[in-house]
Image (tube, rainbow, N blue to C red):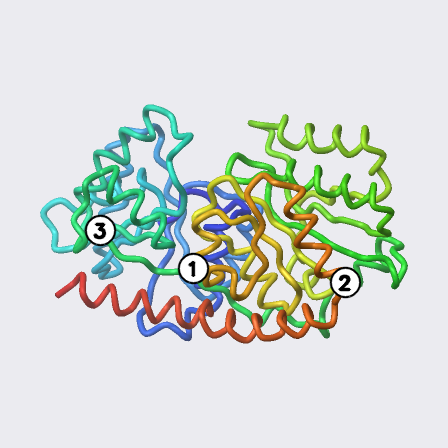
Amino acid sequence: MLGSLNRGGTETLLLDCFRNADKADFSFIGIFRKDGALSYDFKNTSVPLFKLVPKHRFDIGYLFCLRKLIRKHGITIVHAQQPLDAIYARLACIGTSVKVVLTFHGFNFDAGRIEKLMVRSIITNTNLNIFVSNAQKQEYRQHYHLHENRTKTVYNGISFDKLNISDSTDIRNELNIQPDTLLMGSVGNFVAVRDQLTLCRFLKLLHDANTDFRFLFIGARNNAEAWRYDECVAFCKEAGLDNKVLFLGSRTDVPSILPRLDAFLYSTDHDTFGIAVIEAMASGIPVFVNDWNVMQEITQQGKYAHLYKTKDEHNLLFQFQKFLADRTAFSIQAKEAAIWAKQQYSIEQHLHNLWEIYNDVVK
């Protein structure tokens, strides 16, 4: 069950699952409430997709339609991606043997009162709660006093077939960037979980050091918190970075842009996984990310990426100058990281992990 089909980390993961449904050991359908930027892509897969829209939050008619759809397709497990959908599923499946599983894709540090109330009401009423990293799972276990046997960690998976250099976008040509200019980038919408402003401060330091570079921010401006994007644009303009830092907005060709970059930089406040970071690692380019506990976890304590101190642009510059001094060595390390990332975080592995968990849940 999906909330919307908009572009985001959760939707990217699910779209990769839908596109690789033939590689799964189980069959599934999709149920969603809202269309979005990825509607065409989801509907263009082989997975049956159904749109059910509640008229309001307590729509009894919606629950009956959901129950009818679940029974019609012989569903044994409803896997919700949001607490609200898990609540709907639990209510719709009362009196049946259908199990309800919920994946938490984020922290709820900034959640409102109603959202926190929904989490508290459903988290102990699912058959299993799945988390996308051990750090995230530990946070929820402590906060909600969850027993270990009610929780599992399943790392996100990525369809690495889309990371193909032969099909990659010639972003240098598109943006008229010279071959000898250092090209860097970061991917992620301008929302609360990220910290693009630290990257902007780093870029000013790099500019002050007379480095010839271009930096690409790929990610949408969120109208609900537009100040995050606007603050970064204003900072870069004031720092004289107008021509060096480019804000490209949302792009559909991110996987094909990544291999063209000389380095990937990322800064997070509280990501729970980091699909963009893994995609960059798998592209075989050097990756720099702050030492947030989740990033330490998914990079094996910095073995497969270069960690810098959180919110410390000076430490990032220090780490990055090592790269500038020996780009060949960093390139070799990046190729090794790509091999590891593709083995560890493939969509095939993700689907297999889900299959094992589903089997345990229905026993």
Residue, disc 2: 325
Which kind of residue does numbered mark 2 sit on?
A: Ala
**Discs 1/2, front:** 2
Q: Earlier in the sequence, mark 1 or mark 2?
A: 1
Any mark on residue 298, and which?
none
Residue, disc 3: 100
Q: From what the image shows, is residue 236 above or below residue 332?
A: above
Any mark on residue 156, and which?
1
Q: CA distance from mark 1 to mark 3?
A: 19 Å
**Discs 1/3, front:** 1
Image quadrant assignment for residue 195:
top right
295 vs 275, nearest the viewer: 295
52 vs 155, nearest the viewer: 155
326 vs 251, nearest the viewer: 326
Q: Earlier in the sequence, mark 1 or mark 3?
A: 3
Instruction: Provide residue 28's location: percent of width, then percent of height.
Output: 33, 63
Q: Residue furthest left?
A: 95
Which kind of residue does numbered mark 1 sit on?
A: Asn
Relative to 124, is 326 on the left or the right?
right
**Discs 3/2, front:** 2
Instruction: Provide residue 205's location: percent of width, then percent of height.
Output: 76, 41
Which kind of residue does numbered mark 3 sit on?
A: Val
Q: Quadrant of the C terminus?
A: bottom left
Mark 1–mark 3 CB contact (< 8 Å): no
State the SS at label 3: strand
Mark 1–mark 2 CB contact (< 8 Å): no
Mark 3–mark 2 CB contact (< 8 Å): no
